[in-house]
Amino acid sequence: MPPTQASQSVTASALVDEYAKTRALTEALVEPLSDADATLQSMEDASPAKWHLAHVTWFWETFLLRDRSPGYSLFNEDWPFIFNSYYEAEGERIARFSRGMLSRPTLDQILEFRAHVDEAMQPLISREDLRPLIELGLAHEQQHQELLLTDIKHALFQNPLGPAMWEAAAPPANRQADGWYAHPGGVARVGHQAAGFAFDNEGPAHRVLLEPYALSSRLVTNGEWSEFIADGGYAKASLWLSDGWAWVNENGIGAPLYWREDEQFTHWGWQARDPNAPVTHISYFEADAFATWAGYRLPTEFEWEAVARGQEGEAPAHDPAGGNQLDRAEPPLPSGSEGLFGDCWQFTRSAYLPYPRFQPAAGAVGEYNGKFMSGQFVLKGASCATARGHSRASYRNFFYPHQRWQFTGLRLAKDL
């Protein structure tokens, strides 16, 4: 997960402030959780909340303090084994499906670990030579903030009592008008092109040829998905990819994840399902089947990005500090906002592959993206659980086609 370049416009004091805010938000997100809550691991794809807290801290301790702070001693020499994720260069580690067995260390001990590392990091944060790695660490922690939220939601969903993480009522979603962003096609330059931070999989920037197309100005809603179900969408093999049809039948799939009757499970517990809210927690298979049923298709990642860059028409400009994305410890929920960012990650029909001339960085941090470019599909935009400032037009999220515990939705496309 190395950056393509550091942001030279970010001052040292701003970076210090961003570090403090990012670290504080992660801890604020777990304040409603007990030690038992924070230890839960509901499936292999998910991790316990306290593991996320410790893993991002292991990142700072390993790649900044251990390697670049002379005289620093590890907080606990046994902990790298349990909090390394999948960095082969960092040696042996606990199996992923065993993270939920870590009743020790306790949540309080992990918070002590975080405080220890934060204090030791202070002399390093403003060092210009470490700016790329600092920005990478911040982006890494923001990614885990989103994973922490989606993972604990899945864990609490397993409880038949339907416990809420926050006590509140979900606000009604905004109803969005129908519309399309038309693009004339032609040669478009895609990939990261600005001076700010980006992950290595967002580059190098390169040219692609686009045929004329249009991208829907809004996301598909819960109400529209209910129509798909009522029309037998999950029972018509003709709508589904072969692997998707097998997945539906093998797993008894008949609705998005977290749906039951007229309700859906949220961080507020079970809530009445809002027909105007964007549908979310769907798989690539479901998104593709719905698009076929509706008479449209999924966009490619380059079509989505060309609209997001404003290379046509009147696509809303993206303000990374705006939207409805996460910047405080509140329950995330897609609300039907305007624009391309901030409600749900949107499936494209593009395979997650390296761009032309892509080269992973040397060392352990180069393992994050390149070695996973196999079998996933690219998602664009951002979700209600994405930290503000973390999204951009060139960002490439990616998941396997059957996965749906993330805030995943869809935006339709059509040929012109």
Image (cartoon, rainbow, N blue to C red):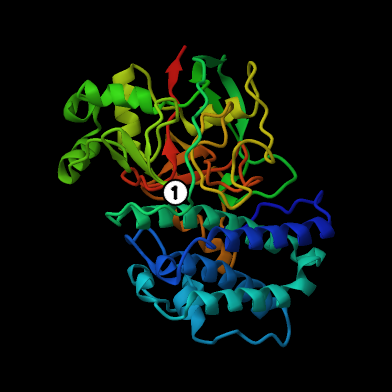
Which residue lies at the image location 56% right of the left edge and 66% below the top edge? Answer: 56
**Which of the 4 image quadrants contains residue 128?**
bottom right
Residue at (53% x, 67% y) in the render? 53
User: Toward the viewer: 55 or 356?
Assistant: 55
Q: Nearer the viewer, residue 284 or 32?
A: 32
Q: Mark 1: which amino acid?
A: His
| The N terminus, quarter of image | bottom right
Specify few, some or many for label 1: CA neighbours under 10 Å numbering under 14, 14-19, or 20 or more: many
283 displayed left or right of 203: left
Query: Of 189 and 105, which appears nearest the observer?
Result: 105
Q: Position of residue 347 (x, y in %)?
A: 43, 35
Q: Quadrant of residue 371?
A: bottom left
Residue 90 as seen in the image, left or right of residue 311: left
Give the image quarter of residue 249.
top left
Which residue in the structure is indicated by mark 1? 267
Q: Secondary structure at mark 1?
A: loop
Q: Residue 333: x and y, percent? A: 49, 40
The residue under the point 73% across, 57% down is 18
Residue 294 visible to the viewer: yes
